[in-house]
């Protein structure tokens, strides 16, 4: 299995001029990066246990045993979860199952739905379209209290009980939550649901390689052993103390230096792979929620954090690239590329006499896709826009495991550079509390009164 390639030639000033990094910028970050790596690794056995997820062989076996025990039993798997309890599940599905998996799943393999929103105009039609009696619902919540996930659970449980009865509904509910905390665990115990544990020391957005991401992946036939093997390979690769050979350290240092030394706060992940588009979405949460913080670790008010942007090649060439090439100098780019697509599509040589079409004939969509990607790289570089590239040999579980682990480690190291706690999310909690208050949850009356006082005098036009 080939290691992921990280090409950062075009983030350097030698390639892009004044907005790029000079050699001393990166050299100056070598020592801090190694210190950051040590600081992160020192927490591996304490509160950063996600670093060890690829080595949990017994858990992986238990998941595979469960998946084998229900093979052929359900037409659908539906994840009820949000944020870190959903984005990785979607990213794995789009990367590692076919793009039309749900239209035509392989024989005996269920379709996958990830309901990571409570918009009734989405959940309502889901209820009208997908038969719950043919579905296993994987309710995922680390806290076991999140209103969105809990409300979906209540709705789906009622529907299952209505259709299948109290006893019959139980095998359709699978819970993934904390071992002891949260109302979801209490309900799972009371109802006797099959359950998996979100391990200690594994935050939501760092949980894709835990039970959170793996259960639904295994149920829809994704090779979770290869996923873990890829992550373990990246872990081994990123233990090196040679800064110039460590892709996670380089990536973190480049992000930090381009933001703080070159004033480029926007970090665009440009997936030149339709299958990796949701990986960009997953990374957006990882970057935003980990680094977007009001306080430094010593408590000073700092308001830090890069802004993630997702784009898909070639689609967004015809939408965003004009801005990227000529707009404000506030962005840098990470392209995700695939060296060898699993399938290629030849372009017929239909009109050899028409020059505007004949150059396409006899080539393939793979050739065109690659030319477009390289064209964008060249255009960005010539426009002075720093850009790097992660290249996967193929979009397969081992490579995806490598990429996930690399980005998680990189963001943890970025937390050290930016001097913020990369593992909390007080801004998200604040929104959750406001929603509890607005929904009338007991204990949040004071907060509700504050919100109501603030919304008086709102400026509106009808
Ligand atoms: O990364 C995070 O911590 C968050 O995005 C959570 O995953 C999200 O808020 C959902 O929380 P929970 O899994 O507790 O329901």
Image (tube, helix red, strand yellow):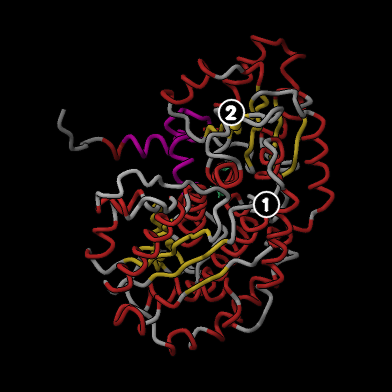
Q: Nearer the viewer, residue 394 or 270?
A: 394
Q: How many marks?
A: 2
Q: What percent of the width, then of the height, locates residue 71?
A: 77, 29
> How many C-alpha atoms fall within 10 Å of the one at disc 2: few (<14), some, or many (≥20)?
few
Residue 147 visible somewhere in the drawing? no
Q: Nearer the viewer, mark 1 or mark 2?
A: 2
Q: Which residues are magenta?
A: 428-452
Height in image: 411 above or below 436? below
Residue 350 visible somewhere in the drawing? yes
Q: What percent of the width, then of the height, locates residue 310?
A: 40, 53
Quick check: 446 left or right of 107?
left
Q: Secondary structure at mark 2?
A: loop
Q: What percent of the width, then of the height, locates residue 436?
A: 48, 34
Height in image: 366 above or below 33? above
Q: What percent of the width, then of the height, locates residue 92?
A: 60, 46
Height in image: 217 above or below 271? above
Q: Quadrant of ligand 1?
A: top right
**Residue 450 highlighted magenta (yes or no):** yes
Determine the CA span between mark 1 and mark 2: 26 Å
Give the residue drawn at x 55%, y 48%: 343
Q: Which residue in the protein does label 1 denote?
A: 209
Q: Which residue in the protein does label 2 denote?
A: 104
Give the residue drawn at x 42%, y 31%: 438
Give the residue drawn at x 39%, y 53%: 313
């Amino acid at each position: 299995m080939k290691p992921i390639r990280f090409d950062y030639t075009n983030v350097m000033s030698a390639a892009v001029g004044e907005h790029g990094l000079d050699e001393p910028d990166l050299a100056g970050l070598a020592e801090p990066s190694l210190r950051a790596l040590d600081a992160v690794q020192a927490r591996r056995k304490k509160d950063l246990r996600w670093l060890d997820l690829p080595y949990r062989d017994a858990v992986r076996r238990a998941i595979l045993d469960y998946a084998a025990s229900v093979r052929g039993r359900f037409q659908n798997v539906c994840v009820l979860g949000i944020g870190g309890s959903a984005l990785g599940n979607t990213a794995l599905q789009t990367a590692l199952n076919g793009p039309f998996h749900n239209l035509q799943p392989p024989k005996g393999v269920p379709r996958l739905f990830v309901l990571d929103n409570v918009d009734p105009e989405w959940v309502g039609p889901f209820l009208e379209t997908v038969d719950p009696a043919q579905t296993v619902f994987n309710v995922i919540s680390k806290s076991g209290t999140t209103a969105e996930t809990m409300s979906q659970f209540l709705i789906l449980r009622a529907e299952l009980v209505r259709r299948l009865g109290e006893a019959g509904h139980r095998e359709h509910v699978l819970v993934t939550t904390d071992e002891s905390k949260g109302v979801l665990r209490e309900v799972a115990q009371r109802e006797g649901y099959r359950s998996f544990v979100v391990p200690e020391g594994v935050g939501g957005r760092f949980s894709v390689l835990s039970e959170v991401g793996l259960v639904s992946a295994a149920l829809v036939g994704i090779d979770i052993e290869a996923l873990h093997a890829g992550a373990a390979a990246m872990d081994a690769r990123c233990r090196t103390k040679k800064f110039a050979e460590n892709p996670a350290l380089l990536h973190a240092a480049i992000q930090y230096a381009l933001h703080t030394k070159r004033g480029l706060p926007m970090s665009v992940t440009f997936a030149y792979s339709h299958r990796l588009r949701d990986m960009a979405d997953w990374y957006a949460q990882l970057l935003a929620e980990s680094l977007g913080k009001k306080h430094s670790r010593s408590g000073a008010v700092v308001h830090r954090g890069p802004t993630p942007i997702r784009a898909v090649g070639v689609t967004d060439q015809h939408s965003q690239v004009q801005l990227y090439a000529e707009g404000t100098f506030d962005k840098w780019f990470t392209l995700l590329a695939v060296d060898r697509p699993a399938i290629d599509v030849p372009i017929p040589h239909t009109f050899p006499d028409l020059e505007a079409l004949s150059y396409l004939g006899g080539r393939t969509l793979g050739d065109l896709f690659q030319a477009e990607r390289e064209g964008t790289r060249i255009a960005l570089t010539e426009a002075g826009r720093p850009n790097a590239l992660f290249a996967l040999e193929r979009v397969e579980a081992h490579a995806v495991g490598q990429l996930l682990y690399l980005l998680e480690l990189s963001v943890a190291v970025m937390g050290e550079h930016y001097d913020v706690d990369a593992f909390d999310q007080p801004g998200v909690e604040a929104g959750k509390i406001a929603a509890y208050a607005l929904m009338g949850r007991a204990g949040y009356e004071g907060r509700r009164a504050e919100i109501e006082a603030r919304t008086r005098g709102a400026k509106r036009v009808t």
